Amino acid sequence: MEPTITAYEYSDITQQVNTLVSAYLSVNDKRMRRVVRDTTIERISAYLPADNPIAEEFLSRLQPDRLTREAAAKLLPTLEPLVVPFPSLSQKQLSKLFRKVKKLKQPEWADLDLHELTYLGWNDGGNQKKYLVAPYHDRLIGIQGDMGPKTVKGVCAICQTIGNVSLFVSTTKRSGLGTFTRNGNYICRDSAQCNRQLTDPQPLADFIETVHAKR
Ligand SMILES: [Zn+2]
């Protein structure tokens, strides 16, 4: 069967399971633990396909009281066959998305878990650049910008989580006017971490809309 769970839904499932594990460690009352567990299972079930053996097995393993962090870490990847992975792009496909970049630094594909990526982002530390590939109106687009050298604690414009963010400055050409606008947004320095925190696709869509060059 075709995978149906999106990467950001998978991130939410991961967060829900981790929150449940934390609750098990802090809640002594068995009935309270059941309430937390039932709520978690209900929320996760909404993302899972019906009548699917992988999904059913996953939910059944969430049923017992108490789940260790180790068991949760083993359980979560069993869902990956149901998660739509980010496409693995060839060097040629990437060059097409960044036509103006002469020597495009390639992402470290081996370090990436494609099931966790709603967008692809990587840094070219030497040139203080960040490259993003993100869905935009049913296709993928490339966005490049300058990444400030400083890292501060702040809210990321993409995942809306407080973490280590840097100022990302991109230049956008406005259609018709022939003028350029510089956009600055604080976003996570580590895009892999950002993706794991991204559970709502809307702020990413808004961000892309702001920084994407209109043609
Ligand atoms: Zn982020």
Image: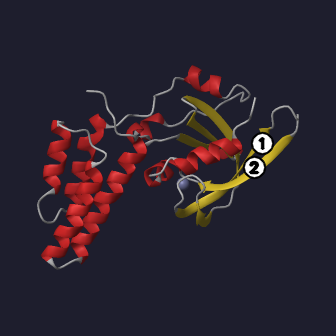
Q: Is residue 66 above or below residue 82?
A: below
Residue 173 location (% of width, % of height): 80, 36
Residue bearing mark 1? 171
Residue bearing mark 2? 183
Q: Residues within 10 Å of mark 2 (few under 14, many from 20)?
A: some
Q: Residue furthest top?
A: 92
Task: Name which quarter of the figure residue 16 lies in.
Answer: bottom left
Q: In what element is the residue under mark 1? A: strand
Lower sequence index among marks 2 and 1: 1
Residue type pointed to by label 1? Thr
Which residue appears at 35% of the width and 58% of the height? 15
Residue 176 location (% of width, % of height): 85, 31
Residue 206 location (% of width, % of height): 62, 47
Q: Judge from the rendering whether residue 46 lies leftward or rightward of residue 181; answer left or right.
A: left
User: Could you tell me which quadrant the N terminus lies in?
Assistant: top left
Q: Judge from the rendering whether residue 177 lies leftward or rightward of residue 210; answer left or right.
A: right
- Asked if the residue under mark 1 is in contact with the one under mark 2, i.e. CB atoms within 8 Å, the reply is yes
Q: Nearer the viewer, residue 9 or 105?
A: 9
Q: Judge from the rendering whether residue 61 lies leftward or rightward of residue 167; answer left or right.
A: left
